[in-house]
Image (cartoon, rainbow, N blue to C red):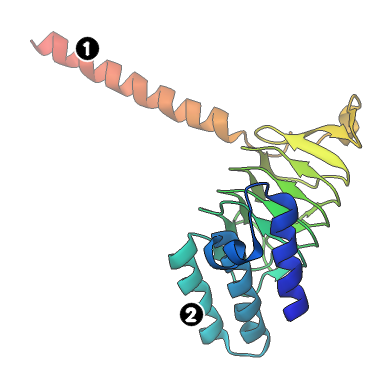
Amino acid sequence: MFQKLKEDLNAVMERDPAARSRLEVFFLYPGFKAVRAHRRSNWCYRHHMKFLAGLIAQRCRKKTGIEIHPAAKIGRGLFIDHGMGVVIGETAEIGDNCTLYQNVTLGGTGKDQGKRHPTLGNNVLVGAGAKVLGPFTVGDNARVAAGAVVLDAVPKDATAVGVPARVVKIAGRKVENPSVQLDQIHVADPVSMELCRLRARLDKLEARQKENSTDE
């Protein structure tokens, strides 16, 4: 337990240039508090004290703005930077030395049963606002860009960007072969869907305005 605590502190000190001391991190960093609270809630969950586990998790959510299900599996040295709005689902798994920024979601799509949330390998970085949704794996050393929506597996050493996300680099080299791209065919583009909804609403408003003008 104390070894993991030390590793979590070291992770923040190594990856956050703003961190001035371990004492400051221990008492003031919400991401560190959330990881520390999850270690306790996960222990309670695994020892069949699920109500207490949920109580710890909800108290942590209220204090830090970070929601981690007690059943989620988190490795060593997780760094949650800033942290507000981070959500980690029940069946999510996170490897060692991963970094998550604010508003990251490791969630599900609502279509799966059992294993519903993603698995992150070791040394994975997920940028601010990114959504990783579904029961697939993001490989070791992968990078998910800020704002990306990942709906399929990401290879190790890859960089995924966009909505929905596509792999643009593997091991620092640009990807040219479409066969290594993420699946873009069987998923809906949420941006296009939202634009269509806005367009339909605009058409209704314009029609209503014309009717009002005719009545006058």
Neighbour tally class for label 2: few under 14, some 14-19, many 20 plus, Cα within 10 Å: few
Outermost residue to the bottom: 48
The percent position of residue 162, horizontal first and vertical second, equals 68, 32
Decide which of tag 2 and tag 1 comes sooner along the chain. Answer: 2
Name the secondary structure under disc 2.
helix
Q: Which residue is mark 1?
A: 210
The percent position of residue 44, horizontal first and vertical second, equals 62, 86
Q: Which residue is mark 2?
A: 55
The percent position of residue 122, horizontal first and vertical second, equals 83, 57
Name the secondary structure under disc 1.
helix
**Is 19 on the left-hand or right-hand side of 64?**
right
Residue 151 versus residue 41: which sits nearer the camera? Answer: 41
Is residue 134 shown to the viewer in this render? no
Number of dots carrying numbers: 2
Please state which amino acid type lies under the numbered disc 2.
Leu
Quarter of the image for residue 8 reads bottom right
The structure residue drawn at horizontal position 82% and vertical position 57%, both measured from the top left corner, is 121
The structure residue drawn at horizontal position 51% and vertical position 53%, both measured from the top left corner, is 84
Quarter of the image for residue 161 reads top right
Residue 204 versus residue 121: which sits nearer the camera? Answer: 121
Quarter of the image for residue 142 reads top right
Is residue 121 shown to the viewer in this render? yes
The percent position of residue 96, horizontal first and vertical second, equals 80, 62
Location of the C terminus (image quadrant): top left
The structure residue drawn at horizontal position 68% and vertical position 67%, both measured from the top left corner, is 91
Please state which amino acid type lies under the numbered disc 1.
Lys
